[in-house]
Image (tube, grey):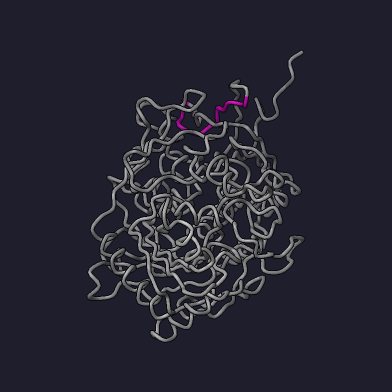
Amino acid sequence: MTNRVFGSGEHHSVLVIGAGAAGAAFAWRLAVAGVDVVCLDRGHWPDPGAYATSFPDWETRRLRDWNPNPNVRSRPEDYPIADDTTPIKPILFNGIGGSTVLWSAHTPRFHPSDFRVRTLDGVGVDWPLTYWELEKYYDINDRLMGVCGIAGDPANPPRSARPTPPMPLGLAGARIAAAFDSLGWHWWPSDGAIISEDYDGRLGCNHCGPCELGCPRGAKASTDITYWPKAIAAGARVITGAAVAEVTTSPAGLATGATWFDVHGVQHHTSADVVVIAASGIGTPRLLLHSGGRDGLANSTGLVGRNLMLHPIAAATGVFTEPVAGFAGNDAFCLMSQEFYETAPGRGFVRGYEVQVTRGQGPLVTALGGFNLDVPWGTGHHRRFEQLFGHVATMAITCEDLPNPDNRVELDDTLTDRFGVPAPRMRYRLDANSEAMITHGLATSRAVLERAGCAEVLESRLVNQAGFHLMGTCRMGADAATSVVDHRCRTHDVGNLLVVDSSVFATAAAVNPTPTIQAIALRAADLLLEERSVVPVP
């Protein structure tokens, strides 16, 4: 007798592909409304006891099996990505929680202007929705994820009280904040999806530091510990180790489900009334381009995979003469500045950038010269290490990336995953606007760090292992001729096929995309519920 594989041959109301930030939020919203929803993910449930930070050699593990680049990590659930045609390398994680398992958890929101860049600045495109249509969903997501911070930032619209207080600035952060004050420039404690005190059954942050390696304590939000337990309790089902190869369709052109491979390479099919893709800005176009025939699925415009946006990130690292405990506290944020966020005359570029002040690194990464440090081998190594370890803070300059159809994700001609499905290829280059923005951002960051008393400032024009933000490859728009999905995240070509991840971003803004991804997914779920005559939860 053959054992039946869970999910194989089943039919569900809604099938979600991808269990990360977007898929989890979408599935939870439907499940609590009583909808039959199942999710397929090629990865597995994370084991906090196996996180790199659970071992004394955590920094070595960070370079190998917990590397954020799937090409380096090469777990069985990862698929290769051809990245020799991009200076910014891909960073993503396959598994329940998706990239929120390894993210930095810096969670600023988009500005209202980010949805109207064509109208305001004559570049990019306008979104078919506004900040105000997402506002309540930002609030819902903040509560579900657990966000630390403080309301009242003058650079942003008013918002609800943060669930927990902001993270401490630390010694270096306080020095840099004083420098911003001295220059008369904006700064504010960062919003972050790391709880600073106990919240919703989770323990508050203990400031151990390496947040991007998974959080065994559960203080850093990832959707495997926030959305998914609540979604499953409400009736959602998750199938792990399910590598989706193709979205299937009927002769009438509607989505019918998905074909997937289990960990043993056996092929299965799960059918559904509605199919929802949430597989990242790389995984989603890959899946659509491999479905539906020669030109791909939902791709009558040829825009699937086009307009890839990555957020070019430059870095200026300040070296203090005295110890500032730069390694202490969450590594990715303490404060941010949006002084140069909006377009202004005379800067030589349109749109703008955010500056995010981050902490220093651990001893091994410091010794290896990682993240913008200059540490020679041989003579002078130990002296230089002592100058840097615990003495640095970095200003990461996140630049708004304008959509360009030549920047894209496509299927590679020869590279495949272990199931024979074509791998994605990234094609990307920086434009002159980004280059000018980087130059300006480095100059302003140097001014701040020097005012803060740094004896030395080290600069990097591009942090190439910075492809955290993969956006735009299935653009949202009102015009079916110039976009892939509408304001509801429904594909123009296939009436029962939705895309709810960062692929739908019309523009990139200059901030981390995750809270906006989740707000969009929650809103799309509510719109689907309305269409199904189901009253959404408040």
Q: Compare residues 251 and 299 and report the one nearer the observer.
A: 299
User: Please, is residue 162 above or below residue 295 in the view?
Assistant: below
User: Please, is residue 351 above or below residue 280 in the view?
Assistant: below
- Residue at the far top in the pictured view: 1
* In-image side of 109 versus 300 (left or right): right
Q: Is residue 200 magenta?
A: no
Q: Which quarter shows the C terminus?
A: bottom right
Q: Which quarter shows the N terminus?
A: top right
The residue depicted at 43 percent of the width and 82 percent of the height is: 179
* In-image side of 333 versus 485 (left or right): right
Expressed as whole percent of the image width and height from the top left, the position of residue 229 reads 72, 50
Q: Compare residues 209 and 9 and report the one nearer the observer.
A: 209
First to last magenta residue range: 251-263
Expressed as whole percent of the image width and height from the top left, the position of residue 281 reads 44, 46
Expressed as whole percent of the image width and height from the top left, the position of residue 112 reads 43, 70
Q: Compare residues 466 and 116 and report the one nearer the observer.
A: 466
How many callouts does the rendering have? 0
Q: Is residue 258 magenta?
A: yes
User: Please, is residue 170 above or below residue 368 in the view?
Assistant: below
Q: Quadrant of residue 113?
A: bottom left
Expressed as whole percent of the image width and height from the top left, the position of residue 521 reads 55, 53
